[in-house]
Amino acid sequence: MSNRTKLQLEDAFEELLLEKTFHKITIKDLTDKCHISRMAFYYHFQDLYDLTEWILIEDARKALNEKKDYAHWKEGLSNIFEAVYINKPFILNVYHDISRYKIEKILFKLVHELIESVVEERSKDFLILNQQKDFIAHFYKYGFVGVMLDWIDSGMDEDYQMILDDLEMTVLGTIDLSIQNFTNKKK
């Protein structure tokens, strides 16, 4: 029941965002559309920002769907791009009405999880500190999210597969090189 209510709120919220801007949507609009009480909404979410964050994180997590290893990182990132693109009206409305910072924060969290998994996998045969692995993941996270935010900011008109191809060519072998630069290989 609980998850069904959350999904119902998500659907209603996305429908309302097609009709009006984020700041014009009220909790009452949502609860009326879902035929639930305000308390039911507050049982699940603190406010509309909380609902928005939950929607974005859930959609991106579904998109990643176990694509967090070296062999599949591009596919995982592609799935995030695709999830953002499929929800273009929702994303653009949230991006322009709430703030770039909210979207950025969520994307940083998701992309960091992806890159962190890749760095962990690629560094298993190396003596490297967790702090160094985390630094590498942060570095790549900022690059990937920056490219994605520029794409969102420009209206998502550019083919994201071309962006992914360029990203792949840019980072090809560089994570391994970063790991090697931090440490010596185990014997």
Image (cartoon, grey):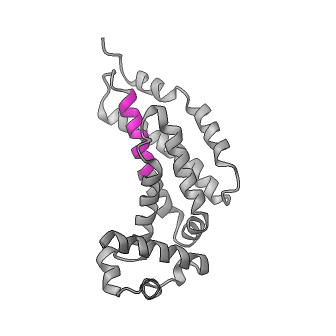
> Residue 126 appears at what percent x and percent y?
33, 21
Residue 24 in which image quadrant: bottom right
> Residue 180 appears at what percent x and percent y?
42, 21
**Figure quadrant of the N terminus:** bottom left
x 46%, y 55%: residue? 60
Q: Is residue 131 left or right of residue 63?
A: left
> Residue 186 appears at what percent x and percent y?
31, 15
x 42%, y 59%: residue? 58
Q: How many numbered callouts?
A: 0
Taking depth in this image into account, of 23 and 157 the one nearest to the observer is 157
x 29%, y 78%: residue? 43
Residue 114 magenta-drawn? yes
Q: Majority secondary structure of the magenta segment?
A: helix
Q: Is residue 152 above or below residue 26?
A: above
Q: Is residue 170 above or below residue 54?
A: above
Q: Is residue 179 above or below residue 87?
A: above
Q: Is residue 82 left or right of residue 6?
A: right
Question: Which region of the structure is painted magenta?
Answer: 110-122
x 39%, y 25%: residue? 182
Taking depth in this image into account, of 169 and 61 the one nearest to the observer is 61
Residue 106 magenta-drawn? no
Taking depth in this image into account, of 16 and 170 the one nearest to the observer is 16
Q: Is residue 2 visible?
A: yes
| Residue most extreme to the top | 187
> Residue 154 appears at what percent x and percent y?
68, 58
Q: Is residue 41 above or below residue 130?
A: below
**Figure quadrant of the C terminus:** top left
Q: Is residue 49 visible?
A: no
